[in-house]
């Protein structure tokens, strides 16, 4: 797979000062009596300021990060303690109340545990696993300390819905987090007092964590071009072509949803090849899958072709500079989360790649040749030859503004029905070709965890499609060049952002 040049920058990085070492076990009292415990280990969770690190093939990178609006509800810590050749696993469950509260981004400890110096420990952290998608796996593997680390590294969790691992609740995001990298052995130092352990002066085990999901968001430019001139080219009797404007559509409302999230994820992110869980990475829709309903059946358990939250309003911002993107992220009264999706470079298809779905409601200047009486969007039919809007399919096909209901007619053109004045555009979250570059086709759109993927709409270049089945889930990402104006960028949370002048690049 082509490597991604992603930059993570915190997202929820964390430092865990802990070590529930060998003496914190069912045999602790006996150990104390035998003098085996000779030191203390403190527990705390640190959320440092964002930092930037280069990741391998990223696109649309915005130089900046977003701290997030996270709420910590559950913290489960697994400690692998190795004494000699024997490794045992212990675990403890905490809530934020087990700490002294958050101070300057740190969950400070109010406890310390006795430990045995010389032992080696590895720390595994799972935060906000409210539905036990990861902890159930690790709990089942904890009985065998010798294989626990290997099992952790290859563990794959499955969800039925994104809400199983990430949700917006009471103005906060509650997101599942796990170790950013595989833990390494730390040797417990002797003669550390309880106070020093709590204060973090010694026996500090640092664990960085990251969110297992990314956030996706769409905004609309406050000066976005919201009128679309429908044009057609006509040839006169002498064979001379002339382009003419045949109608004008005006965008009234813009909403978006995000589809194509994975339904499986690696508990430990692959930060070498950036491969996601194998059933997702290897999934390629069959060429015979031509409808999204059929895709839903074929992709079951791997890719989610729907958004449980449905369409939501896209906020208006003056541009996609960092301050505006961060303001929009904090202002949304919902959050669109996705689990990461990557594939081999040759295997990206419309039906296995995460996308923004844009729903634009519009009115037109003329229906059946006359100015509409009201301004409420209504169902219209666009003649594909003459480029005019009609009130019925029959009038559009007949090119007759006054054709009566039930009257016979000769079909002169094909039409597109826009129900309730709604049309749709589809934008890839992290395209490998900029939307303002029409010299190359978009062929990949990889997403990884702990990112923000942001699309900023600057205009509408042409009419969208009438429904999603107008695009084929088995096709490559871009099969033709047409026009929406979008600026894309990806924050940490790393932000990826871009601008889009909406056209149909799919």
Image (cartoon, helix red, strand yellow):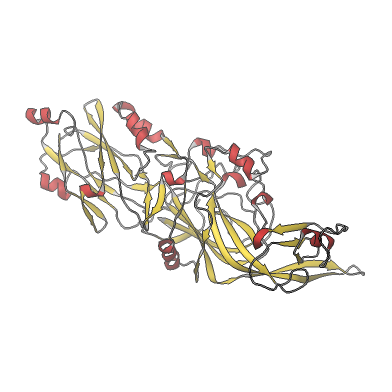
Q: Is residue 438 visible?
A: no
Q: Nearer the viewer, residue 207 or 309?
A: 309
Q: Position of residue 174 (x, y in %)?
A: 37, 50
Q: For this rendering, which residue is in front, 400 or 172?
A: 400
Task: State whether residue 215 appears in this view.
Answer: yes
- The quadrant in which residue 81 appears is top left
Compared to 209, does 243 lie above or below?
below
Left or right of residue 111: residue 463: right
Q: Residue at x 37, y 33 (%)?
A: 137
Q: Is residue 147 above or below residue 70?
A: above
Q: How many marks overall?
A: 0
Q: Is residue 352 left or right of residue 449?
A: right
Q: Nearer the viewer, residue 437 or 504?
A: 504
Q: Position of residue 49 (x, y in %)?
A: 31, 58
- In terms of image quadrants, where is residue 180? top left
Determine the image quadrant of residue 188. top left
Image location of residue 187, percent across then percent down: 21, 37
The quarter of the rendered structure image containing the N terminus is top right
Q: Is residue 398 left or right of residue 247?
A: right
At horizontal 44% and vertical 67% (from top left) the residue drawn is 324
Residue drawn at x 42%, y 64% is 331
Left or right placement of residue 341 versus residue 269 in this view: right
Percent x, y for residue 109? 19, 48
């Amino acid at each position: 797979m082509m490597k991604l040049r992603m930059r993570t920058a915190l997202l929820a990085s964390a430092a865990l000062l802990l070590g529930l070492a060998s003496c914190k076990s069912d045999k602790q009292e006996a150990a104390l009596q035998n003098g085996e415990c000779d030191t203390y280990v403190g527990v705390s969770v640190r959320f440092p300021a964002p930092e930037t690190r280069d990741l391998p093939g990223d696109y649309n990178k915005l130089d900046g990060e977003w701290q997030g609006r996270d709420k910590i509800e559950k913290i489960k810590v697994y400690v692998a303690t190795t004494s000699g050749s024997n490794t045992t696993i212990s675990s403890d469950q905490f809530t934020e109340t087990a700490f002294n509260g958050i101070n300057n981004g740190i969950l400070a400890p109010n406890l310390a545990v006795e430990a045995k110096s010389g032992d080696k420990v590895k720390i595994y952290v799972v935060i906000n696993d409210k539905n036990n998608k990861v902890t159930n796996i690790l709990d089942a593997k904890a009985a065998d300390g010798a294989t626990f680390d290997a099992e952790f590294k290859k563990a794959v969790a499955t969800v039925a819905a994104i809400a199983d691992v990430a949700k917006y609740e009471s103005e906060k995001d509650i997101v599942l987090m796990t170790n950013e990298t595989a833990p390494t052995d730390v040797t417990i130092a002797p003669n550390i007092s309880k106070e020093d352990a709590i204060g973090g002066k010694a026996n500090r085990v640092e664990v960085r964590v990251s969110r297992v999901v990314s956030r996706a968001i769409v905004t609309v430019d406050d000066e976005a071009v919201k009128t679309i001139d429908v044009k057609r080219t006509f040839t006169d009797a002498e064979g001379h072509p002339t382009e003419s404007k045949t109608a004008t559509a005006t965008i009234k409302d813009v909403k978006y949803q995000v589809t194509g999230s994975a339904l499986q994820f690696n508990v430990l992110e692959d930060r070498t090849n950036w491969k996601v869980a194998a059933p997702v990475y290897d999934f390629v829709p069959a060429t015979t899958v031509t409808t999204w309903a059929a895709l839903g059946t074929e992709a079951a358990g791997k890719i989610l072709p729907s958004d449980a939250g449905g369409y939501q309003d896209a906020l208006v911002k003056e541009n996609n500079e960092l301050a505006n993107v961060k303001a929009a992220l904090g202002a949304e009264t919902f959050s669109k989360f996705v689990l990461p999706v990557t594939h081999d470079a040759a295997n990206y298809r419309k039906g296995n790649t995460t996308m923004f779905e844009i729903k634009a409601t519009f009115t037109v200047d003329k229906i059946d040749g006359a100015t509409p009486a009201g301004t409420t969007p209504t169902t219209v039919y666009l003649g594909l030859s003459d480029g005019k809007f009609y009130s019925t399919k029959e009038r559009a096909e007949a090119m007759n503004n006054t054709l009566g209901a039930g009257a016979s007619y000769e079909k002169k053109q094909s039409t597109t029905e826009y129900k309730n004045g709604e049309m749709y555009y589809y934008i890839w979250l992290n395209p490998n070709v900029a939307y303002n570059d029409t010299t190359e086709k978009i062929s990949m759109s990889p997403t990884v965890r702990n990112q923000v993927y942001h699309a900023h709409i600057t205009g509408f270049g042409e009419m969208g499609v009438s429904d999603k089945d107008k695009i084929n889930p088995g096709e490559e990402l871009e099969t033709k060049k047409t026009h929406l104006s979008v600026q894309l960028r990806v924050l940490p949370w790393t932000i990826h952002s871009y601008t889009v002048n909406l056209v149909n690049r799919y």
